[in-house]
Image (tube, rainbow, N blue to C red):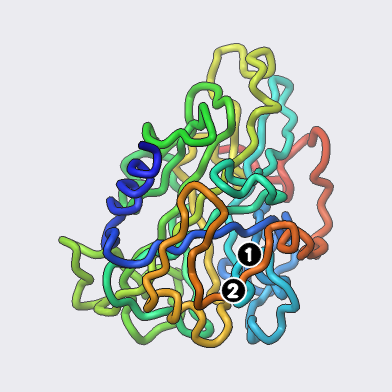
Amino acid sequence: MLWRLLLAATAALPGVNAAGATLRFSCSQLVVERLDPLVNPGMVGSPHLHQIVGGNSFNASMTHDIPTTSTCTTCTPLEDFSNYWTANLFFKARNGTFKRVKTRGNPLGYDASNGGQTVYYLSSGKVTAFKPGFRMTVGDPTFRTASQISKYKMLDYTCLQTGSTRGGATTNFPKGQCKVGIMVSVRFPTCWDGNNLDSPDHQSHTAYPSGGKCPTTHPVSIPQVFYETIWDTTPFNDKNLWPEDGSQPFVWSFGDQTGYGNHADYVFGWKGDALQRAMDANCNSDLLNNKINCATLKTQTIPDANKCAQQQMAKDNLEGWLPQLPGGVMVT
């Protein structure tokens, strides 16, 4: 039953169905850090905190050749040195202090991971893999309303009562306590203009399909990049820690306590034609277990992926109760 639910969920993605690839794998935590090479290139100490997975050449500019510069990756495909990142979640206590929420491995196959994300590459039919230098973002950290986030397809939250909970997703933070954690899902567009590896807003070179087809302005079908990040909110499930009025206590590192500012960044870094091979082979990974089912790719174990790590460049104290969000971000 769960298998069918998961298949239905991926089939429902815009421009994606079960006829193509469903490549799924674990990416362990690389670093938690105030760097954002897309929005704030060159700045060591970006405005808000991120959690990052992927290749260990991640830096403030990302102008280098990623596959040849990286010496390891936190993802199980050994040829994937891409970087995937999101903002970090915090718990806000009654006294106004903050504590960082950590990520955890996905209970569906990736419990051995030291956190990070589950990453998918999905397709329907023939797709063109990303080119070296390609990058994009999705979502908008300034959004605070449901009408604003409706601009994007499928940026949502699932309150996990068990590790296999699916359904009941919302575009804002869950209102109640989640026994296993909060799963945040982010799905990027599947159409590309065919020319630009980036754009000034890091989004307009990509688009979502309409009626199952890419628009004429963005005619090239690309794989859908899809993140699932599971935030371990279980240390905060004591209702006595929550606000006295019962309102939800979580806030993103950029100050959003609604959840509508959900966003993510992606920089392509696969080696050679590895991703194209996987898409052409229509690799279909196990949705419940740690089985990538993609013979064309070289892989490593999750314990080996956990060994790849990077030290903070922007030094922040992230442990214990903090008087303010890193970078002095205000809650808005």
Residue 25 higher or lower than 114, as above or below: below
Mark 1 element type: loop
The picture quadrant where one finds residue 66 is bottom right
Left/right placement of residue 161 relative to residue 8 reads right
Q: Nearer the viewer, residue 24 or 260?
A: 24
Image coordinates for residue 37, horizontal then vertical, percent = 62, 70
Left/right placement of residue 244 relative to residue 314 reads left
Image coordinates for residue 88, horizontal then vertical, percent = 64, 47
Circle 2 residues within 10 Å: few <14, some 14–19, many ≥20: many
Left/right placement of residue 316 relative to residue 237 reads right
Q: Amino acid at mark 1?
A: Cys
Image coordinates for residue 121, horizontal then vertical, percent = 44, 65
Going 57% across and 77% down the picture, which residue do you hit? 269
Residue 261 higher or lower than 213, as above or below: above
Residue 59 makes an appearance in the image: no
Residue that label 1 marks: 75
Residue 191 makes an appearance in the image: yes
**Residue lying at the far left of the rendered structure:** 211
Residue that label 2 marks: 80
| Mark found first going from the N terminus, 1 or 2 | 1
Residues under numbered marks 1 and 2 in contact, where contact means CB atoms less than 8 Å apart: yes
